[in-house]
Image (cartoon, grey):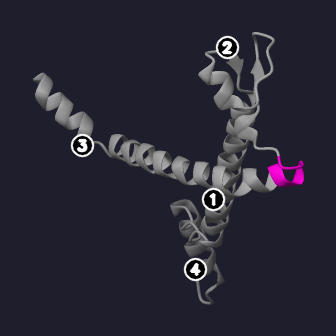
Amino acid sequence: MSMVSEFKAFIARGNVLDLAVAVIIAAAFGKIVTALVDGIIMPIVGMVMGGVDFSQLFFALDGNDYANLAAAQEAAAPVITYGAFIQTIIDFLLIAFVIFMIIKAYNRMIKKEAAAPAAPAEEILLLREIRDSLKRPGL
C-alpha cells in the first residue's frame, strides 16, 4: 500500500475527522469564553474588589514604582503580570465548568433513552417451550 493511499485511509477514518471538528469548535469556544471573561466577568469581579482591573496587575522586578502596566512596559522594565495569570485561571475554570455541564446534560439525555430489553437467550426459549409443552394436557 502506498503512502498516499495509507494517508487517505487514515484521514477518511471517522475518529480523525471527529477530532479535527472538535479542535476547531474548541478554538472557537475558547474565544467565546475569553470574551465572556474579559468583557463581563472580570469587570464585575474588579468592581467588587474596588475597581481593580486584573489585566493591569503587575509587579515590577526593577524595584521602581510605575503608574500602570503600560508605563512599566514603556520603560522596558521587567514585570511579572500576575493579573493576566489570574484571568487565565478564571478562563480555564469557566471552560472546565461549561464542559462539565455539557457532558452532564449529554449523560442525562443518554440515560433517558431506555435501551430495549435484550432478547432472551436461545436456551431460555427452548426451556420455555419444553415447560409449555409439559403443561399441555394429553401428553
**Can residue 21 be seen by looking at this rendering?**
yes
The first of marks 4 and 2 along the sequence is: 2
Residue type at mark 1 is Ile
Q: Which residue is mark 2?
A: 78
Which span of residues is magenta-colored?
Answer: 46-51
Mark 2 or 1, which is nearer the eye? 2
Mark 3 or 4, which is nearer the eye? 3
The first of marks 2 and 3 along the sequence is: 3
Residue 22: image location, x then y, percent: 44, 47
Residue closest to the eye, 139 or 81: 81
The first of marks 1 and 4 along the sequence is: 1
Q: Secondary structure at mark 3?
A: helix
User: Is residue 50 shown in magenta?
Assistant: yes
Mark 3 or 1, which is nearer the eye? 1
What's the CA distance linking mark 1 and mark 4? 54 Å
Q: Secondary structure at mark 1?
A: helix
Q: Residue at x 33, y 45 (%)?
A: 17
What's the CA distance linking mark 3 and mark 1? 28 Å
Pointer 4: residues within 10 angstroms few (<14), some, or many (20+)? Answer: few
Q: Which residue is mark 4?
A: 133
Residue 12 numbered mark, or none? 3
Using the image, determine if residue 78 lies above or below residue 110: above
Residue closest to the eye, 99 or 52: 52
Q: Quadrant of residue 118?
A: bottom right
